[in-house]
Image (cartoon, rainbow, N blue to C red):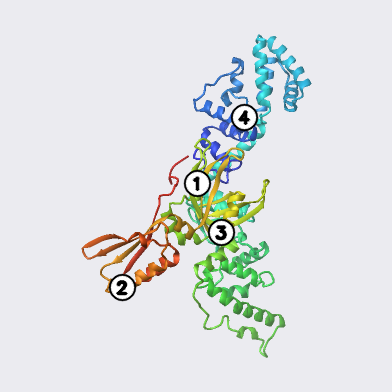
Amino acid sequence: LKRYRTTAVFQLESSGMKDLIRRLQPDCFEDIVALVALFRPGPLQSGMVDDFIDRKHGRARIEYPHPALATILKPTYGVILYQEQVMQIAQVLAGYTLGGADLLRRAMGKKKAEEMAKQREIFVKGSVERAVEPETASYIFDLMEKFAGYGFNKSHSAAYALVSYQTAWLKAHHPAAFMAAVLSSDMDKTEKVVIFIEECRRMELRLTPPDINQSEYRFTVGGAGEIRYGLGAIKGVGEAAIEHLVAERRRAGPYRDVFDLCQRVDLHKLNRRVLDALIRSGAFDALGPNRATLAERLPAALQLAEQRSRNDSAGQNDLFGLAVAEKTPAQPTPAVEIAEWNEEQRLGGEKETLGVYLTGHPIHRMAAELAALNVTPLRVLIENGGSRRGGNRSVLIAGLVVSVRARNANRGGRIAFVMLDDASSRLEIRIFPEVYERYRSLIEEDAILVVQGALGWDEFNQTTRLNVERVLSLEGAQAEYARRLIIQLDGERLQPGMLQPLASLLNEFRSDGRCAVWADYVGSGARAELAFGPNWRVRPEAALLDQLRKLPGVEAVRLGYEAQPSMERNSLA
């Protein structure tokens, strides 16, 4: 809890709450109760939260308005936080009955001037009768009136805090079982499943893909630190179909291949669309050499199963009572086997059926380029990014566009909300009209974008905020930030005449930009770096890099970048 790793923990999972936990550092149950009560607009905007935290950590003096109130206010470091504390103060200091104290609480909540004047008179009079100075009594009443506007019902807060503690305990001591249960509870909500899968990876829990011979309808615990993907989380596959598949597996054992499966199940419950979704999700990986082959075999498997079903229904028997259907071969021979889908098609199938990329991510192909650009991983930005007191910082991020929502802005133009995914986490960024209009053509689903902006803190929503300043494609970012194109030449393989194709290729991509060309020559016992003249500046496009890598004698090609602002990977804001 003190490390604010509270994703999936009841009431404590928002980014704003995580920041509050980071600052408060709760070390007892009373602090968890206080967390729930403090995380509301009133306390956050009034300065009460800052005062509470400073008192807890000894940065501010803990003071009680009267010695008799020390017992009541000690759990909250002298701050009036709960409605029950208002009632207790009235009872102890002014002799209110329990019913009278509740009437006082209600009056303070409604803020009716006439009723408050009446209650002030009762409170001061009762306090004076108990040897409290009138000025002190009136001051305490003012404090009660001020904090009553923010006061939360402690009984509610304690009930929430108990469930928060219980779920945090389960997450800490039984992480795999807890996350499997959490994933199962929200498996029909893809966005939440994505967040929980990211948390599983952060917790170093191994999430194995769905498997028709091992998975259940819900997410389950496999070996130590392992969670098996639930078949019920696959899009386009209903609960009845999954339960039927699992029941047949339990009855007759694991499915051997796609032909065996199609002949054993009720194809009225599992049509081709459902089976195709199971293949693309990876759930049938155990039934064949690869997903492309399974998809190719599926029509034949369905045809064979339907033929057998028709024969069985017709009761076709020969003169000796032997079923003709049994003469039908169990599977075509030889079985078709084709090459696996390319990575884009394979991952696209996972994204469409699972809502996430499970066995890879499109951004991994650009990992080296993004690392060279010094982009900040989204998980680092979310966990350590916005600080209430750190001011705005420039940062560079990158991600795959998962979704784009645009609406009319109050002051004209269109404002966009773009969800980015970089395999470490997801982050929704807000792009204001002027910037959105400038880069609108780049912002579309499945595009990989590099975004530069000022990182700050949203006080109202209590969350990290990124004010987007620039949006670039990966090629655009390379062209913008690359300062060197470095071509490593293998001296052992270079032959006379090989440099002419290199010069011709570079000439095609000449520009007046800022990317200079360098040659890194490595020969037997010698190495030299050669800078091309200023007339040889180029556009560092992907086409140029790809063609350079194919030239004889070229060992490697890389870009050198201008230093970009980034966050320390292990820093804790």
**Closer to the observer: label 3 or label 4?**
3
Where residue 14 appears, as percent x and y from the top left, is 58, 43
Q: Are marks 1 and 2 in contact (CB under 8 Å)?
A: no
- Which of pointers 1 and 4 lies earlier in the amino acid sequence? 4
Q: Residues within 10 Å of mark 4 (few under 14, many from 20)?
A: few
**Of the residues shown, which amino acid type is indicated by label 3?**
Leu
Question: Which mark sits nearer the N-terminus, 1 or 2?
Answer: 1
Check disc 3 and report the residue beneath it: 442
Q: CA distance from mark 1 to mark 3?
A: 23 Å
Dot 2 falls on a residue whose secondary structure is: loop
Q: CA distance from mark 1 to mark 2?
A: 46 Å
Residue occupying image coordinates x 68% and y 82%: 311
Q: Secondary structure at mark 4?
A: helix
Disc 1 + disc 3, Cβ < 8 Å: no
Tell me if mark 3 has few (under 14), some (14-19) or many (20+) residues whose alpha carbon lies within 10 angstroms of its own: some
Residue 1 position (above or below residue 355):
above
In contact (CB < 8 Å): disc 3 and disc 4: no
Q: Secondary structure at mark 3?
A: helix
Q: Could you tell me which secondary element the residue under label 1 belongs to?
A: helix
Residue that badge 1 annotates: 381
Residue 434 on image: x %, y %: 60, 50
| Residue 552 visible to the viewer | no
Residue identified by numbered label 2: 498
On the question of residue 447 being in view, the answer is: yes
Residue in the picture at 57% in, 54% down: 438
**How busy is the neighbourhood of tag 2: few (under 14 within 10 Å), some, or many (20 plus)?**
some
**185 and 103: which is toward the camera:** 103
CA separation, marks 2 and 4? 72 Å
User: Pointer 4: what residue?
Assistant: 46
